[in-house]
Image (spheres, rainbow, N blue to C red):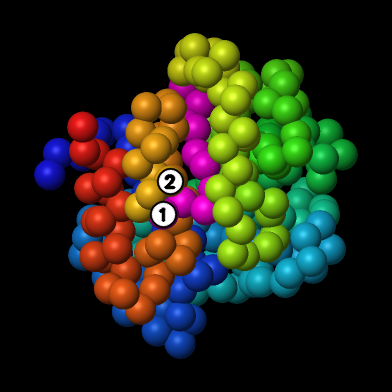
Amino acid sequence: MTIPENVEIAPSVLSADFSQLGDQINSIIRANGSVLHLDVMDGHYVPNLTFGPLVVKAIRKMTQMILEAHLMISDPDAYLKDFILAGADIVLVHPETCSSVADTLNQIHDLGAKAGLVINPDQNLSLIDPYIDQMDQLLIMSVVPGFGGQSFIPEVLDTLPAYLPLLAENQVLIEIDGGINLHTIAELKQTGINRFVAGSAVFNSEATPGKNYLNLLTQVSQD
């Protein structure tokens, strides 16, 4: 199996069995996984409540994989330092939650992490226009954030082709999150997306996380 150098799967830890979290992460490590996606929800910006910096710190002790913290919280500026000190390598924020998007991105960089913006399905990619040269990463949500079991929304990618040259020029990694499985990932191979967040497609009872991870990589790598 030949894996394109710029394609990655980022398993979403939120879908893991937390009673076996170490074993499940080790399964992905054995499959040569390089990134873990950490969904942080505050029960305010989104209805659900997940985990905070203490869990990130615990996961950091388990692995040297890249940890990206997706902050679905109403006041990310107040917690940036906590998550980065806990071990987050990348911090992703929603523009509408920041009092000053530019200042938030700068603060993330000053704290030693990479910074990214998240665009929801009902938002236009034009929101990132003023910040492309400050961003390391763009996360496109293909479901409404904060809710599980949703179907992939293909329309979120309608305007992406027009942005690909500018994103490439600024070396912005493009990631998508929501409804990613063996079927949808096969349809996204030629879209310019570099990283695919997958939750239940990796963490399920059908196979080990490592096996499911490799199956997704195989699907996105086939001609």
From this viewpoint, which residue is outermost toward the right? 99
- Label 1 is placed on what type of residue? Asn
Residue 97 covered by magenta stretch: no
Q: How dense is the environment of label 1, judged by Cα within 10 Å: few (below 14), some, or many (20 and up)?
A: many
Question: Residue 110 at x, y = what percent?
Answer: 63, 38
* Callout 2–callout 1 Cβ contact below 8 Å: yes
**Mark 2 residue crowding within 10 angstroms, few (<14) / some (14–19) / many (20+):** some
| Label 2 SS | helix
Is 45 on the left-hand or right-hand side of 71?
right
Q: Nearer the viewer, residue 145 or 110?
A: 145
Say which residue appears at 46% left-offset and 22% top-offset. Answer: 171
Q: Amino acid type of disc 2? A: Thr
List x then y, in percent, for residue 19: 45, 87
Q: Seen in the image, is 51 located left or right of residue 190?
A: right
Taking the image as shown, residue 7 lies to the left or right of residue 223, namely right
Q: Residue at x 31, y 52 (%)?
A: 216
The quarter in which the N terminus is drawn is top left
The stretch in magenta equals: 171-181
Q: Is residue 172 left or right of residue 222?
A: right
Residue farthest left in this picture: 1
Q: Name the residue under label 2.
A: 184
- Which of the pair 201/69 is nearer the observer? 201
Q: Per the image, is 177 magenta? A: yes
Residue identifier under label 1: 181
